[in-house]
Amino acid sequence: MPKINLRESISEISKAWNYDVTDRTIRNSFAKAGFFVSNENSLREKEEISDDVLVDDFLSLDSEAETSETLTELDILDSVKNKNNTAINCDEDEDDEDGNDHDAEINKPSYDEMPKSFETIRHGLQFEENTPEGVFVALQRCETYYERKHFFKENTQTKLTDFISN
């Protein structure tokens, strides 16, 4: 059995939660495990909410809290300069790569290589700073698409006779 670390398990749970698991699946899983909804938990009395605090006071409670660092003009200029230098270096790298890759033949990766590739990309992106969450969602969608496409392509429907032993 392969070892699964915390990062991989969170990724798999997220993928299942976003694409594979329905509310019916969850209900059935809990029922199979012996958990049932009891009348005790389903009917709770409503709690009284006091009107001592006004809504405006509640909404503006943390308006004065500092949520990010205050940048000076020099900090902003340094940030822009670093981004420009990175963009220039990336363009130079692309020019170098374009000259050598014309002779290389591109082969279709095998089914076993594709999940490893997705995992490599996910692993690399997790170490990048400020990676938007949408990138991971898009990667999960690609991975789920590929897994489903391969699953339905390779698997055929089982017959009832496959389950009956004589």
Image (spheres, grey):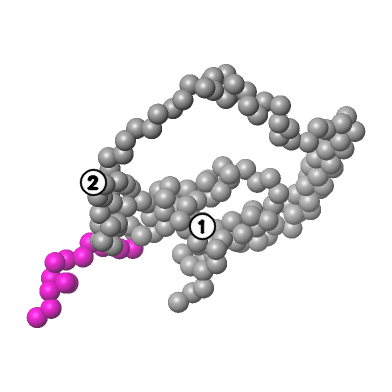
- Disc 2 residue type (three-letter): Asn
- Relative placement, left or right, of 80 versus 108 is right
**Residue with the mark numbered 2:** 39
What percent of the width, then of the height, locates residue 11?
A: 51, 56
Residue 144 appears anywhere in the view: no
- Disc 1 residue type (three-letter): Ile
Label 1 element class: helix
Residue positioned 65% across, 29% down in the render: 62
Q: Which residues are magenta?
A: 154-166
The quadrant of the image that shows the N terminus is: bottom left
- Give 29 or 136, whichever is nearer the viewer: 29
Q: Nearer the viewer, mark 2 or mark 1?
A: 2
The quadrant of the image that shows the C terminus is: bottom left
**Residue with the mark numbered 1:** 10
**Residue furthest toward the right?**
74
**Residue 154 bears which disc, if any?**
none
Mark found first going from the N terminus, 2 or 1: 1
**Residue furthest toward the left?**
166
What percent of the width, then of the height, locates residue 35?
A: 28, 57
What percent of the width, then of the height, locates residue 52?
A: 52, 22
Q: Check disc 2: other Cα within 10 Å, few if <14, some if 14-19, many if 20+.
A: few
Residue positioned 68% across, 45% down in the render: 130
Residue 26 appears anywhere in the view: yes
Would you identify the image quadrant in which residue 53 lies? top right
**Majority secondary structure in the magenta region:** loop
Q: Check disc 1: other Cα within 10 Å, few if <14, some if 14-19, many if 20+.
A: few
Label 2 element class: helix
- Give 143 or 156, whichever is nearer the viewer: 143
